[in-house]
Amino acid sequence: MSSLDWLILAGTLAIIIVYGVVRSRGNRNMGDYLLANQSLPWYHVCLSVMATQASAITFLSTPGQAFTDGMRFVQFYFGLPLAMVVLAVTFVPIFHRLKVFTAYEYLESRFDARVRVFTALLFLLQRGLSTGLSIYAPSIILSTILGWNIFWTNIIMGGIVLVYTVTGGAKAISYTHLQQMLIVTVAMFIAGWMTVHLLPADVGFMDALEVAGKAGRLNTIDLKFDPDSRYNLWSGLIGGFFLQLSYFGTDQSQVGRYLTGQSIGQSRLGLLANGMLKVPMQFLILLVGVLVFVFYQFNPSPVFFNKVETDQLLKSPYADQYRQLETEHQTIAARRQKAVLTLNKALSEKNDASVEQTKAVILKTDEEAKAVKGQVVNLIKKNNPVGDTSDVNYVFLRFVLDFLPHGLIGLLIAVIFSASMGSIAAAYSSLASTTVVDIYKRLFCKDYSDGHYLKASKVATIIWGVFCIIVAQFASKLGSMIEAVNILGSLFYGVILGIFLVAFYFKSIGGKATFWAAVITEGLVVWCWLAELTAFLWLNVIGCVLLIGIAWLLEQVVPTQKTVTPS
């Protein structure tokens, strides 16, 4: 990166952090620190909810996902708008009316302390692990740009966010989210435009889409019902609906964002606006990845996008083998480029026979390139058994650093950093609030002063920050970050959602049955995943339905005394 890039990067991040902390001065109590005293308008709620979900993983891994697998990942979000409607009608008014700090407080009044604490612990485990992945994603950038060990970049990234989260609390998080989402939107539009601009002069945006379509990258909707397929219309609408409903309705990192709304109406508007904007935003990010794929059809591409690992190979005893594979890759790329140019000409001339012929050549070269890449991955494993052998998370970053103009590089890196800071900060805050309110205050120190709990919240934030940084040190083993974080969520979200649905709608089921149903179901969900019985999105449906069914059966066998809070 040039001096201009570093200046824009540092300036953008400094403006976001300083603005957030200054606007949030004066946290006097736990209500200020954790919920911003429920004083924020709907657009703050909307952008804060979006920014919490849109981590650096979104802007690093999602374009890489589209590069390798096409647009079908967008189906993952098809259930989100419907989930926002359900949340606005049911969850939001209940949480606001009960004036809770966390979603899990409600469970004790409905069931008992055991259900509340167990659900809180499921959330803490899932969110703590996921936040470690969110820290690792931007650390990749620092490691790639500066050549630093990923161990230190994880510490730096997690530590920077920890400082302003502890200092500013929920208001700092919300105000920084507002700036982040505005910058993110502008930068991604510019990135898409620049990618098209870098294509050959006779290849426009529509031409690029046609090439992408023939290469199988515009597979936006898959109507086939296949439980083993990770992304299709049905897994997105059904599995995605359950995942999004649980994520936004029971995950404190999200609940804490819309509980900052001035009123039920403002929180509802914020969630509904998020439902309308999130799918188009995700579509745009995936489309940028597809355009990067098209760019590399007309230009030489690296055989492996993680430069840190390939640089190590060049210094290793396997250097000659790697250079030979690199040469073979470039030969394949040249044949593919020739075929793509022919395809573009055939498309403009509407020569269907030539289109099909060149399409077959392109698909064949794709398979050959994958085979060569597989051999490079094997060399990386031999040279460094603990090395990162997945380069999905590096595709967009490598493109940005190699081809975009200086200044824009700094802005896009700032976007990825700021997005990461927003999601990590919200996660730190939710982990702290759940720990203090649902564990520390409930089980250990019930009747202390508000000032004591404010200090405890800051200490809990620090402890969780350290834990998440430790988790980040092991994240390189998990492949695509965008998939890993959603798989991790799917292991827990279905069970948590099932607990809340029982609480809201099955008044005949008590706490004892619900608790043991949750324990049994969580074990079954993990077993389903380990046994690879179905694609991960369906785990959300399985967890939710199983919990409700098992809880009902247990209630018939061993009826329990229930405390029902009107909803």
Image (tube, helix red, strand yellow):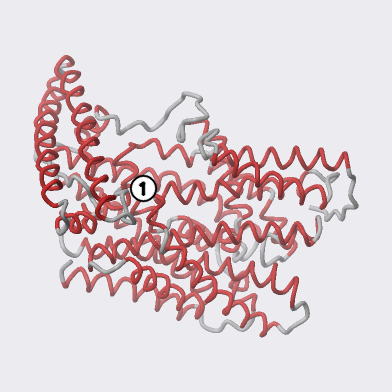
* Residue 66 position in % (x across, y down): 33, 41
Q: Secondary structure at mark 1?
A: helix
Among the 4 quarters of the image, the one containing residue 208? top left
Q: What residue lies at 34% left-to-right and 56% top-to-bottom?
A: 386
Answer above or below: position of 366 versus 49.
above
Is residue 423 visible to us here? no
Q: What residue lies at 35% left-to-right and 56% top-to-bottom?
A: 185
Q: Is residue 316 left or right of residue 289?
A: left
> Quarter holding the N terminus?
bottom left
Among the 4 quarters of the image, the one containing residue 257? bottom right
Q: Is residue 431 left or right of residue 150?
A: right
* Residue 491 position in % (x across, y down): 57, 47
* Residue 212 position in % (x across, y down): 25, 33
Answer above or below: position of 444 versus 414.
below
* Residue 534 position in % (x across, y down): 53, 33
Answer above or below: position of 365 versus 242.
above
Type of the residue with mark 1: Thr
Q: Nearer the viewer, residue 193 or 359?
A: 359
Q: To which residue does mark 1 refer? A: 62
Q: What residue lies at 12% left-to-right and 43% top-to-bottom?
A: 300
Q: Residues within 10 Å of mark 1 (few under 14, many from 20)?
A: many
Q: What residue lies at 33% left-to-right and 36% top-to-bottom?
A: 70
Q: Is residue 367 left or right of residue 158?
A: left
